[in-house]
Amino acid sequence: MPTKNQDELKKLPAVEKVLSYAALKDAIKRYSHPVVTLSVRAIVDELRDAVNSGGTVPALKEVVEKVKTHLAETWPGLLRPVINATGIILHTNLGRAPLSAEAVSTLADILGSYYALELDLNTGERGVRALEMEKLLQIVTGAESALVVNNNAAAVLLVLTALAKGREVIVSRSELVQIGGGFRVPEVMAESGAVMREVGTTNQTFVRDFEQAINGNTAMIMAVHRSNFALRGFTHDAALSELSALAQNFGLTFCYDLGSGAIADTAAYGMSHEPTIGEALTSGADIVCVSGDKLLGGPQCGIILGKTAALDKLRKHPLLRAVRVDKYVAIALSVTLLHYLKGETEKLPAFTMMQTTVESLLERGKSVSDELAAAGIKAEVIDGESLVGGGSLPCETLPAKLVAVKIKGDVDDFSRRLRLASTPVLGRVQEGRFIIDLRTVFPTQDSDLVQAMIAAFGV
């Protein structure tokens, strides 16, 4: 005689029966039949375990809702734009700098076709990869030569591997930085095969410290910009011009890992001055490495600028093949650089966000809080601060007007519901309230933001 559990197990719906349910039609269109099938099987397995523990099988409609929830939790960010209400302009976990509308439209126009990525259209022969992009970089920055790889960590790795493998690289102890994701200068140097030679102390390093460390096995002097933290108080750094002169006197390569990649003067946007690419090159550095998706405002890439003789050695190294850029980056970076040449930096979203006034944030904040209030949600506009982020301008903030929303229940649970919304929303939590910083929300997203908030509240 079958047990109660066996009778209940027979009620488990077949996978194909669940998949045929009309309410999953949109999910299959979005995720594909195989992906939805995996979620259905996962839910059926969960129900089987529940029945074996004494539970019952819910109605098919409830099973389908469980599948939808499973899909949303398993694939929350699949091909979805995210509303960044954190106020962090260059949010590393959200892809840093958004591309300009023109860059996006140019990518859409070209990527469905072919692109002369590595073809000389004059001769019809194979040419230099992304040559026009490199030429634009030379014009914008004033560098003798330019080379682009897939990110700045790759740029530094390529420089060290090609120019200092098996030899010593002198660097100040105060610049042995770690950035997000565990990227550490000493570890990258070890991976390259170069031998790191630390000099100076945590807070004081002089040019004489570098000079005393030079020996017959020295290949390079390296400076690293502290782009994600500040060192204050009783401090001293050797000037870039001093290090450049020292390297030149001893026939060494001087490499400066600038990181943040500023071309424009950030002081013009109400912040402290961040060292620019132009200043780094003027200091006499043979090689300058920067990120493309930070203060430059372009796509993720590592940009290597400097002396032709040094960069020619990098072009010949086999590692370049592994870290070279693709057509997506070549196109997006070229459009970004043209914005600088045309005097159109206002078209770069990161700069637009930096320039957004407190008055504008107040007006939008009132509008958003009024719409939330109309739905029965308590919200008010308060004073606050935005951050540049992305390992740029550490400790630098911009005055802002924030929307503070009072949450009934657990604010962390509410935040999670917003992250799993059809258009994910990220904000920040402060004193038990959900905080919206509209500086990093595109004005066209304000309505979607309000609707997501209302849905998360269930009103």
Image: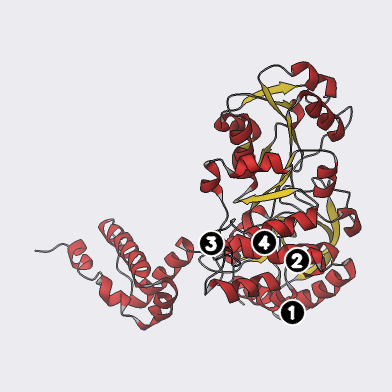
- Mark 1 touches mark 3? (CB < 8 Å): no
Q: Is residue 387 in sight in this rendering?
A: no
Q: Which of 433 and 294 is in front in this view?
A: 294
Q: Earlier in the sequence, mark 3 or mark 2?
A: 3
Q: Which of marks 3 and 4 is nearer the N terminus?
A: 3
Q: Earlier in the sequence, mark 2 or mark 1?
A: 2
Q: Which of 375 and 243 is in front in this view?
A: 243
Tell me if mark 3 has few (under 14), some (14-19) or many (20+) residues whose alpha carbon lies within 10 angstroms of its own: few
Query: Which corner quadrant holds the C terminus?
Result: bottom right
- What residue is pinned by disc 1? 371
Q: Which of 207 and 144 is in front in this view?
A: 144
Q: Nearer the viewer, residue 81 or 300?
A: 300
> How far apart, in angstroms, are the residues tagged by discs 4 and 2?
11 Å
Residue 154, horizontal then vertical, whole percent: 60, 44
Tell me if mark 4 has few (under 14), some (14-19) or many (20+) residues whose alpha carbon lies within 10 angstroms of its own: some
Tell me if mark 1 has few (under 14), some (14-19) or many (20+) residues whose alpha carbon lies within 10 angstroms of its own: some
- What residue is pinned by disc 3? 125
- What residue is pinned by disc 4? 132
Considering only vertical position in the picture, is 311 above or below 457? above
35 lies left or right of 230: left
Residue at (39% x, 69% y) in the render: 67
What amino acid type should be assigned to the residue bearing mark 2? Leu
To which quarter of the image does residue 12 belong?
A: bottom left
Query: Which corner quadrant holds the N terminus?
Result: bottom left
Residue 298, horizontal then vertical, whole percent: 70, 60
Residue 372, horizontal then vertical, whole percent: 72, 76
- What residue is pinned by disc 2? 338
Tell me if mark 2 has few (under 14), some (14-19) or many (20+) residues whose alpha carbon lies within 10 angstroms of its own: some
Q: Earlier in the sequence, mark 4 or mark 2?
A: 4
> How far apart, in angstroms, are the residues tagged by discs 1 and 3?
60 Å
Which secondary structure, mark 2? helix
Observer-side mark, 1 or 3, equals 3
